[in-house]
Image (cartoon, coloured by chain):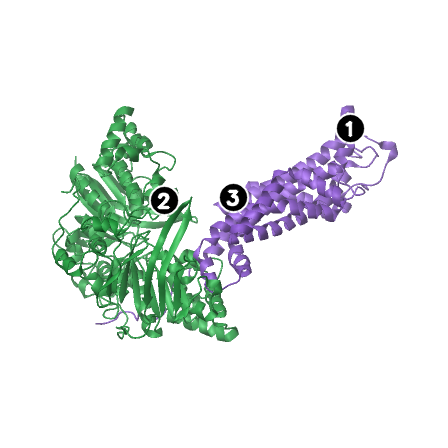
Amino acid sequence: MTVVQDPTAPITVPSAPDQAAIARRERLRFLRRSPTFLIGCALVGIWVICAIFGNLIAPHDPEFPDVLNKLVGPSGEHIFGTDRLGRDVLSRVIVGARSVLVIAPIATLLGTVLGTAIGLVTGYYRGLVDEATMRVVDAVLAIPLIITSLLAVVALGPSRVTLILVIGFVFAPIIAKTVRAAVLGEAQLEYVEAARLRNERGLYVMFAEILPNVMGPVIVEFTVRLGYAIFTIATLSFLGFGADPSIPDWGQDISQHYQFISGDVWWPVLFPSLAIATLIVGINLVADAIAQSFER
Amino acid sequence: MTDFAIELDDLQVVYRVRGKDRQVLRGVSLAIERGESYGLVGESGCGKTTAAFAIMRSLPRNGRVLSGSIRVNGEDLLGMGQGEVRNLRATTLSMVYQNPGSALNPAIRIGPQLAEVFELMGVSKEDAAKRVHGMLEKVQISDPTRVMRRYPHQLSGGMQQRVVIAMALAKDPTLLILDEPTTGLDATVEAEVLDLIAALRQEFGTSVLFISHNLAVIAKMCERVGVLYAGRLVEEGVAGEVFRDPRHPYTVGLLRCIPRGGVRKDETPLDTIPGFLPPIGAEIQGCVFAPRCGLVRDICREEEPPLYPVGNGRTSRCHFHQEAHLLPRNAPAELVGTRPGNGGGPLLAVENAGKTYRQEGQEVHALSDVSLGIRPGEVLGLVGESGSGKTTLARVLLGLTAPDPGSQLELEGAPLAARVQQRSREQVRSLQVIFQNPDSALNRRFSVRRIIERALYKLRGLRGDERSRRARELASSVRFDESLLAVRPSQLSGGLKQRVAIARAFAGEPRIVLCDEPTSALDVSVQAAILNLLAELQSGEGVTYLFISHDLGVVRYISDRIAVLYLGHLLELGDAETVFSTPHHPYTEALLSAVPNIEGGERPRIRLEGEIPSAADPPSGCVFHTRCPRKIGPICEQEEPPLEEVEAGHFMRCHIPLEELRVLQAAPPAPRYQSKTTS
């Protein structure tokens, strides 16, 4: 009996490229070629630049009241016209990007982190913890988002920190539901049982073993929620509960000028509205493309 | 009209992956005569299913036929327009897929779903319903009217597959393609479905293309067989002859991988096929099998062998087909026999283990009153059909599922807590597991190194250099190349992944490893290598296994003792050879007779009547009496037989005395149940 190949020798395979790395690379390639993603990025990019360099780009001082030129229509001097105090609308739109683009991502991040943690705990432990938490979540979701936020802002007093906390806490349950669903699927896989058979602690299993496998839905959820966060912030400041009445803000500018529309003064309302719209559309385009890249 | 139902000529199929065409079928030529049954065998990735899809003209989006031709009834299939192809699928070609659960639309009742096939052929609605009824009778469904009102999920797997077969045969097709039709089914159900297919083929005179990785099933079902390797047909001929006297080294190797003929791990290690299947689209010069062939010579690497005729219409694509049977063995050295002694107490014992689930107000008894002990150093095989409680028992032992109160677990004489969290670290590391599916058992975001080192850290408390040294040792003990420690599981083949899972299970130097179908997801050649590895680790480390499998050949090969479970009850327990040879429990007898063997010799078949009863409503008396072909009378229905030691070390739960069973089983049983279409 001859033995062709020593079967006790370690088995080697021709080095195959890492499938996970390939998937990541393919995802990036898909995004680079996706018009949805590129247009979305361009829209968001413009507003991010405005938020960072607003004061340098703005043609006028957004706070300077030119009392002699109140409510002047778009012209060469003021491309987007002036508002009721004679401030340059274009400059206010550009500088106004900052307040929303600072609060929204931080608030969404807070919501995502909280929501992911809740989703992991409820999805992994199930049982009573899950039932109790999910009923609270349902209760929060039953009340319209904007009313919950309003109540909280009224109770805590408007400020940046309040807005971030309020939006973060209101979003957390929604994100928790999505993450929980993904965790339920993962927790049934045997690698989780293998971890239990090593006496791993729950925290390790949830955050080290399961979390990396549910990052896809988490990322998608973050981008989608970011759009909603911007909308919520704009609405709150429209209703007069913005972060700080003294700094330029799209929602606040709209609310201070919509009564003039009947007098054919449309520009101080239209341009901030367009700003909100383009930013949200941009973010949603990016979110869609990212979600698609995970689904493929 | 030609004599052939289907002819493939030099068929080349490519898949476009990442902008490049990768060849999957490399010039396959075969022809199936009218009424003939043709088997296509080969391991996964050889192109079997691709061939079926090409014939159905339903290749995936990125696949296309590069060249060659397919003729159905003499007509060129590839030149047809979409309309003609649809027509052909409605009348001439049928396919049965592996998973009947996903082949049926879950939202449509069986009746209307089947009637659709007839309506597509232009049969009126009323006639269609009648013909559905007739068709369901043909596939031996006992109460067609009731079944027609059911949704697919309300039927068992075997029933679903019957419905799919009824659907496929409803149009009286010229060619029926069966793609692994019984792979997901239990042995007893598989046997029934195979009998049904054979009987229907007689009746309808349909040509069959039977695709399977299971050589024994092909041997039983097919007249001719083609062996596919890396997209090329390497051998073809009359099924019995090919399996008795294979003329291609791949066929020889494949046949040697299968544990059969009662060989045991301590007598004969299994042969394996070295190396790996070439990746799809690989550039191959010369013979496709040359890199893995033990008979390879220079000419094999340079010159592609033609199809040599080897007599009786057989062909082989091997330059040295006369010498194929001389293929050198590729097996590890024989192991020193380590039959465990009978002395001493059991290492792990369960007493009165039960597990009752509550489902929609009903109690489901997954496990009732199971008591057994696993001796140090032995392999205890656990067999039974799905739903018999094999996996529940394993999970109870592991502490993943808490058993009912009153169940007792003992490890080395000390009580073992019901939940893994309450067990001592020593106990936790003593008891480890190898799961069936390494894809889900390994965290896909972790590298192999991290997987193994984490187990070393948690179970042995190792850190730093000591830990990485031990990780490398473990890797080499399961024959896993160190250079692959950095990669993630998704880069590895199924066999290599399972090796990682084995390394992880052995990280804590366990006393007992529970193997839950560890080779069921693997190809036979890989299965052989993993079984060898498990046997070798056992003799080296003196570890004990509880080995769960539905494959009786595998269980017989590796086990010292065998326990047979049915509906959560232990029916028989004894030495492997005792259990496998007569006299045995009537259920064991039926299980054994259901397994087809490659030699093709028909054993007296024992049919089991009906479906496995629901565990929510187990039969009174002996749980097996509803299907038992040896039932003796009312006592079986009224009284549960005790688990008795009928001879030394041989336990059985049956009212029939052992001596009587010995006499009964010497002769084939008088069938108490005769099916309508038995030929």
Residue at 39% across, 44% down? B62
Whole-percent x, y for residue B452 in the image: 45, 67
- Mark 1, Cα crowd under 10 Å, few <14 / some 14-19 / many 20+, is few
What amino acid type is highlighted by mark number 2?
Gly
**Front of the two marks 1 and 2:** 1
Residue B568: which quarter of the image?
bottom left
User: Is disc 2 in the same subunit as disc 3?
Assistant: no
- Element carrying mark 3: helix
User: Is disc 3 in the same subunit as disc 1?
Assistant: yes
Structural distance between the alpha carbons of marks 1 and 2: 63 Å
Tell which chain the image draws in green: B
Check disc 1 and report the residue beneath it.
A259
Sequence-wise, which precedes: disc 3 or disc 1?
A: 1
- Mark 3, Cα crowd under 10 Å, few <14 / some 14-19 / many 20+, is some
- Element carrying mark 2: strand
**What chain is tagged by disc 2?**
B
What amino acid type is highlighted by mark number 3?
Gln
Tell which chain the image draws in purple: A
Quadrant of the drawing holding the C terminus of chain B? top left
Structural distance between the alpha carbons of marks 2 and 3: 23 Å
Check disc 2 and report the residue beneath it.
B63
Residue B187 horizontal side relative to residue A57, left or right? left
Q: Is residue A159 visible?
A: yes
- Element carrying mark 1: helix
Residue at 26% across, 44% down? B178
Residue A44 horizontal side relative to residue B513, left or right? right
Structural distance between the alpha carbons of marks 3 and 1: 42 Å
Whole-percent x, y for residue A253 in the image: 76, 36
Quadrant of the drawing holding the N terminus of chain B? top left
Residue B549: which quarter of the image?
bottom left
- Mark 2, Cα crowd under 10 Å, few <14 / some 14-19 / many 20+, is many
Check disc 3 and report the residue beneath it.
A292
